[in-house]
Every structure is written in structure tokens, then in C-alpha cells.
Amino acid sequence: MKDKEKNILLYQKFLKGEILPNQEIELFKWLESSESQESMRFFYKEKWDSIKECNVPAEIQNRMLEFINKHKQVENSNTSFLFKCMRYAAIIIFSFIIGISAEFIFNKLHNSSNNTKKVIITANKGQRAKVTLADGTKVWLNSDSELKYDNNYGTKERNVWLKGEGYFEVTKDSECSFTVICKDIEVEALGTIFNVKSYPKDKKTTVSLVQGKVKTTANNKSITMKSNECVSYCKCSGRLYKENLEYFNNSLMWKENQLAFNSAKLKDMAIVFSRIYNINVVFNSEDIKEIAFSGVIKNNSLENVLELINITSHIDYEINKDTVYFTKKINTNY
């Protein structure tokens, strides 16, 4: 394989969050060289032509423009600055093609270029993200979630910080445990598969173990978990306890694009809808918020979810742009 083709492949791995640290160093050295310019020009044009009809969100455009302007003074020449602009633009374009969060791509480049100590991966509302860490550990982030880790991850420690929900397939390393640190709990593993749900607005934080063995700790209390077990930490009472098998099964369905609710109140479901679909929810009365739902929704498009709520309850809905309005059905008593 020619060096040019190899470097373009490394660049694509970088955009997907799958590049290894030594490959990243090699890539950035190439990007700073003059010989990369022609290859990057062709790459940029090719990706741009493939999505001519795609509109890049104004928010992302503005953030990238601010970033470029902030670094404009440190460039050695107009030519090098031009090609940096092209690279940043190509990142946005390519992020839409491969279907991952542009927020993740921006944060990854921002941290790499400034040699900061934290790498930040973000899945915005309505999006998901996947990343492969330096040791081969794979992480899937649910909507409205953030993962942080040191840029020297894996050299001495394997610690990550999670806000939101993440599914982890951890590479085994008997000499270096893997730890997920949330606001309320810590989850320690050597090599295993598990899910952690730790959203700030939720009433509890939950750990679901698919395979292997982990230790979950909160308030100086620890529970060692076995496969197919689920442990929750109640933020109000400070209690750490085991959930039933049904709760365990439901906790993993998001990764298969399914929604599961067990006597969930509509006000709590609305928080989930806001994360997944990036919408606002408005209720026309307080009593609607307290209506409970149970069941599994396999095709979880927004329209399908709202129709099921409408069919199985006394609730109507209306969608206006990015807001869903829930109202009582006329002539209905609870």
C-alpha cells in the first residue's frame, strides 16, 4: 500500500475514533508536512461532492469557525492555514457520512491539537457515538452522554469518566483494572461486558453486567456482580441494591434500538424522549404526567412511540417543529 493511501486510511480511522495513539502521532506528523496537501485537497473535494445536498448545522459551523479563527495567528503561512481549514471542514463533512457525532469529532481534534490531558467524547441529544480506546476496549454512548479519559490512558491506569449511558466491552488486562467513574458510583472490571446508566436528572444510577465480573461501589458500600445481574444506586436514599432479571433485560435494549418501560410515568418517559429524539415535551395538565406505561417498543421511531401512547391511553399529541404537546382526549375521565 502506498504511503499516501495508508495515511488517508489512518485519517479515516481518526475521524471514526478508532485510531491508536502511535498511529495518531504518525498521522499528525504527515498532516503537518507539505506532501499531505494534495491528498487532503482530493479527500476534501471527494467527500464534499458526495454530500452536496447535506446542510451542516449552523451551530457546528460557528464552533468550527471560532476554533479556526482562534488558531489563525499561530500558522506559519497562508497556505498552511488554508489546508488546516480544509482538514477541519473535511472532519465535519465526513462525520455526517459515517453517521457519528460531529461533537465527538470536534472535541477529539481540539484536544489533540492542544495537548490537553482529557479526551472528551460526546453523543448529543438525538445521536450516538462509538469509540475504541487504545487498549482495544470498545464503548458505545447513548444519546446525551459524555465520556472522558486521559490522553495517556492505558499506560498506568484505565480510568474513564461517564455522564449519561455507556455500553462497555472491556479488553482483558490482569495487571490493570478498568474503572468507570460516575458522579455517584464507580465500576471496576478486569475484562468484561457491562452497561452503565448515570444521567444527572435520573433518580438512580444503574449497572448491568452482561459477561464477566465487576465490583460496583457507592457510599463506601460495594457489590460484586455476576453475569446477568443488575445493581442500582438510589440517589435519594443512598442505597445500593440488586434489581430483578426483567430490569436487567430492559436496561440493555437501547443498544438494539428498542425502548422498554416498566410502570414508567409519562413525565419520566418524556426525559428519555428528549434525549433520544432531541425534542421538547409540553404537557397541558399535571395529571397527564403521572400516567404510567409498561411494555417494549421494538420500532422506536418518534412517530411510532407517540402513536402507541395515543392508542393505549387517553392522550392525544401534536408535533410542532421540535416540540411534542401532550393533551387529554376530549370527553375522557381518568
Image (cartoon, rainbow, N blue to C red):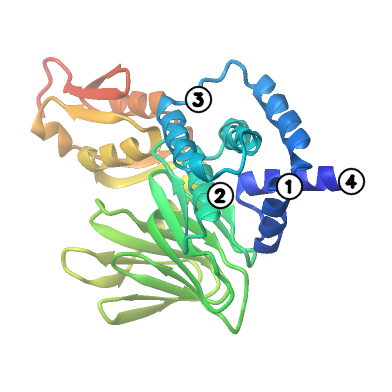
Q: Identify the mark nearer the N-term, 2 or 4.
A: 4
Q: Identify the mark nearer the N-term, 1 or 2.
A: 1
Q: Relative to 79, is 209 on the left or the right?
A: left
**Three-letter code for the amino acid on which mark 3 is drawn:** Val
Label 3 neighbourhood size at 10 Å, few (<14), some (14-19), many (20+)?
A: few
User: Residue 56 — which label?
Assistant: 3
User: Residue 2 — which label?
Assistant: 4
The residue positioned 50% from the left and 57% from the top of the image is: 167
Q: Which residue occupies the extreme right position in the image?
A: 1
Label 2 neighbourhood size at 10 Å, few (<14), some (14-19), many (20+)?
A: many
Q: Nearer the viewer, mark 2 or mark 4?
A: 4
User: Residue 52 — which label?
Assistant: none
The residue positioned 62% from the left and 31% from the top of the image is: 97
Q: Label 3 vs label 2: CA separation?
A: 21 Å
Q: Position of residue 115 (x, y in %)?
A: 52, 59
Q: Label 4 vs label 3: CA separation?
A: 32 Å
The residue positioned 27% from the left and 54% from the top of the image is: 200
Q: Label 2 vs label 4: CA separation?
A: 29 Å
**Three-letter code for the amino acid on which mark 4 is drawn:** Lys
Q: Nearer the viewer, mark 3 or mark 2?
A: 3
Q: Quadrant of residue 98?
A: top right
Q: Position of residue 192 (x, y in %)?
A: 56, 70
Q: Nearer the viewer, mark 1 or mark 3?
A: 1
Pick the front one: 40 or 215: 40
Q: Label 1 vs label 3: CA separation?
A: 28 Å
Q: Secondary structure at mark 3?
A: loop
Pick the front one: 332 or 157: 157
Q: Label 1 vs label 2: CA separation?
A: 30 Å
Determine which residue is flagged by label 2.
130
User: Residue 33 — which label?
Assistant: 1
**Three-letter code for the amino acid on which mark 2 is drawn:** Lys
Q: Identify the mark nearer the N-term, 1 or 3.
A: 1
